[in-house]
Image (tube, coloured by chain):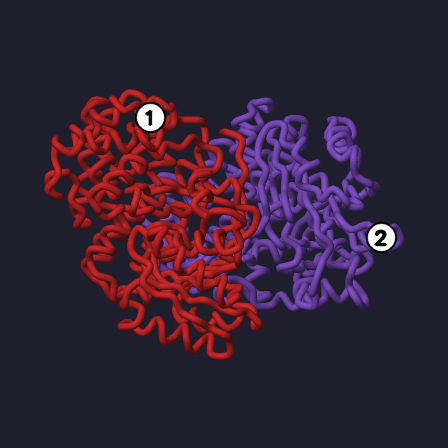
Chain colours: A purple, B red
């Protein structure tokens, strides 16, 4: 096992009816900004519930945070926070709204140009406004971590930052609030969570059996519950299991003490920045090919994955590994997320542009062994056509 | 899945050489009291390392915290903290030292008689001194939770309290510091961690597959690594895996959203209070009989446990359940912890006294269904002879 630090102070309030707890966990004297995306929280009643729970508080609202939240939009929220001297943020939505709120929290009090927060990946953040979240879309894990990804549209740049100062103070997870999600978002969410686990699990062995089993436990649960979430959208327990898995997939726990990869995410980010694909779509395209191309360096874990997650015990090593990768691809397709560039009207002609983006973002040695060069990324993308 | 809150702000620093980080995580201006037990941290060099890492700080020491820390001893530490106006505590040791330090932290600043903290199970704790820990004995999980058990010798009472104010600020876990532990303490620690998992897992199903798999993952890892920890006391990875499992077994994670039992612990506490048995010895005595007596109400989970943890898939239900309970008992014995009252020179003649203690502590309806009456506890103890 590798040395590690684990620290995660976010208070999770999980279950039916928990939005009512808002009045208890938001400080009574807070001047609150509620941040959200489009209209879904209006039509499904979540916004009304939030307003009611905060009825004793000073509250303003900021809407219009888009999927892949943009620096441009978020800076308008920063301006509002500063002008109105707001001191507590409440994100209501999915990972994009929460990621965006983290940036607003860090930028509102930041001395200097907030763009440098993203350029320096958060290393220059020394404080942030306190904030909580109400999660309506299980996927990114942002509700229980201190990471954020923000896109600067004008530069086609999708940039990540993290800071110990941007853990949510609390996150409210009510699985019933996910009943009205479109099928596409449920599918995307399951694929996103699955890929998060794989980035922390599918590397090389360091004798960390309990981390491995936790990771495998999340993967198996997503494989079982994900299709049920599509088939029975009103099944509370299924939605609860998917929601808690997505949080556990990226709250630091399964990655503690083990090597991590993240090459799939880095290549995927460029596909979103260039062509506007959903984050999960990019992961579904890149991950199976990434495993195929890097089969040798991941051999031991791929064999373990094949056996423990997919039950593939017979046949030679090659066929078990190929079988596990194929089953991974099929699972993404089963969740309604296509796994080929051509499914999104992209192809060989787009690969150079992706590589240029990776190069300009200095993503030239990715992965747990830093051996995913641009040439390897090219192979991966070619295999993803 | 049941509704739940999860909150755990303890910063874990895990791995080789992490005691050196003390100078960073203890506030520079703190007036520190280092609390420890007997002499083992003197002979194995841990105390010297701590002194060196804190060399720039104002530090005093308090030694003599016993296994099953006593109210009487801890109140002497409270007096020292108050007289010397100390403001940061550092527990160096195992669960007893950390549990004791939690009580000192809560009592030092408490208005009124600190005994009422235990009588009210911590509900009246409104603040506590900040404290950290250096764990030298993986077992109780106290390093990453907010629970504490304190014994008042004069009353033969072993009392638990918890409070959101007594999470350690940090805990340093260096597996290499466990190399010199006596065999008995390693065995006890593994049994203790195993029993903690069972109290949160072996109840009835509530459709919580990821919690189940995490629990099973810890159990499987303890079964694999525990005997290696006895056989190869200098194997760093083995000790690291046992240590992290013991922490994960009782940090709130696997118990989030599921029913919990704890009857075994309550009966065990009385055996310790009356006869001075090690905590883990009492669990090893009580748990197998507890499962046997309550087989019907735990049937579904016992069958799952038999299959997933012990690989028992064939034969009828009774034989699988009995087999799993027998394997549990054998595992405790393999870890060097005897599982019968008679192994500790106790027998039928002691059972009435245990039941009287349970009655006087109002432990008359225990377990996840509150159906472990005194009559059931009697059956369990009779089966444990």
Determine the residue positioned at 68% across, 42% down: A133
Residue nearest the observer in this picture, B93 or B346: B346
List x then y, in percent, for residue A43.
77, 27
Determine the residue positioned at 48% across, 70% down: B22
Dot 2: few (<14), some (14–19), or many (≥20) neighbours within 10 Å? few
Q: CA distance from mark 1 to mark 2?
A: 55 Å
At mark 2, the secondary structure is loop
Above or below, comparing residue B3 to residue A129 in the picture: above
The numbered mark at residue A85 is 2
Residue nearest the observer in this picture, B160 or B239: B160
Q: Chain of mark 2?
A: A
Above or below, comparing residue B288 to residue A275 in the picture: above
- Mark 1 or 2: in front is 1
Q: Residue furthest right?
A: A83
At mark 1, the secondary structure is loop
Above or below, comparing residue B324 to residue B345 in the picture: above
Viewed as shown, does residue B197 lie left or right of A380?
A: left
Badge 1 is on which residue? Answer: B364
Quadrant (top left, top right, bottom left, bottom right) of the N terminus of chain A = bottom left
Determine the residue positioned at 77% across, 57% down: A156
Q: Chain of mark 1?
A: B
């Amino acid at each position: 096992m590798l040395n590690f630090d684990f620290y995660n102070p976010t208070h999770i309030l999980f279950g039916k009816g928990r939005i009512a707890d808002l009045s208890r966990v938001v400080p009574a004297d807070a001047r609150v900004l509620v941040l959200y995306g489009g209209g879904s929280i209006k039509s499904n009643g979540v916004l009304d519930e939030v307003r009611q729970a905060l009825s004793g508080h000073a509250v303003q609202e900021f809407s219009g945070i888009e999927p892949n939240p943009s620096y441009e939009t978020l800076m308008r929220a920063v301006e509002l926070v500063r002008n109105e001297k707001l001191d507590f943020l409440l994100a209501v939505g999915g990972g994009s709204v929460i990621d965006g709120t983290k940036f607003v929290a860090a930028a509102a009090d930041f001395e200097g140009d907030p763009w440098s927060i993203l350029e320096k990946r958060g290393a220059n953040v020394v404080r942030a406004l306190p904030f909580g979240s109400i999660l309506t879309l299980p996927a990114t894990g942002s509700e229980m971590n201190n990471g954020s990804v923000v896109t600067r549209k004008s530069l086609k740049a999708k940039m990540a930052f993290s800071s110990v100062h941007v853990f949510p103070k609390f996150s409210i997870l009510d699985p019933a609030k996910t009943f009205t999600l479109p099928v596409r978002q449920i599918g995307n969410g399951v694929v996103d969570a699955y890929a998060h686990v794989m980035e922390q699990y599918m590397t090389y062995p360091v004798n960390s059996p309990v981390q491995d089993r936790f990771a495998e436990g999340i993967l198996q649960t997503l494989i079982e519950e994900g299709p049920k979430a599509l088939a029975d959208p009103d099944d509370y327990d299924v939605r609860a299991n998917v929601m808690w898995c997505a949080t556990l997939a990226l709250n630091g726990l399964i990655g503690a003490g083990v090597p991590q990869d993240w090459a799939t995410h880095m290549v995927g980010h460029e596909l979103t920045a260039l062509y506007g694909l959903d984050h999960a779509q990019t992961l579904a395209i890149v991950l199976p090919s990434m495993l195929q191309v890097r089969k040798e360096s991941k051999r031991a874990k791929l064999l373990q994955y094949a056996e423990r997650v997919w039950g593939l015990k017979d046949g030679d090593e090659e066929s078990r590994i190929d079988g596990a990768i194929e089953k991974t691809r099929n699972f993404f397709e089963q969740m309604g997320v296509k796994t080929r560039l051509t499914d999104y009207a992209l192809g060989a002609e787009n690969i150079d542009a992706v590589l240029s983006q990776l190069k300009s973002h200095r993503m030239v040695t990715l992965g747990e062994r830093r051996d995913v060069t641009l040439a390897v990324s090219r192979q991966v993308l070619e295999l993803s056509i």
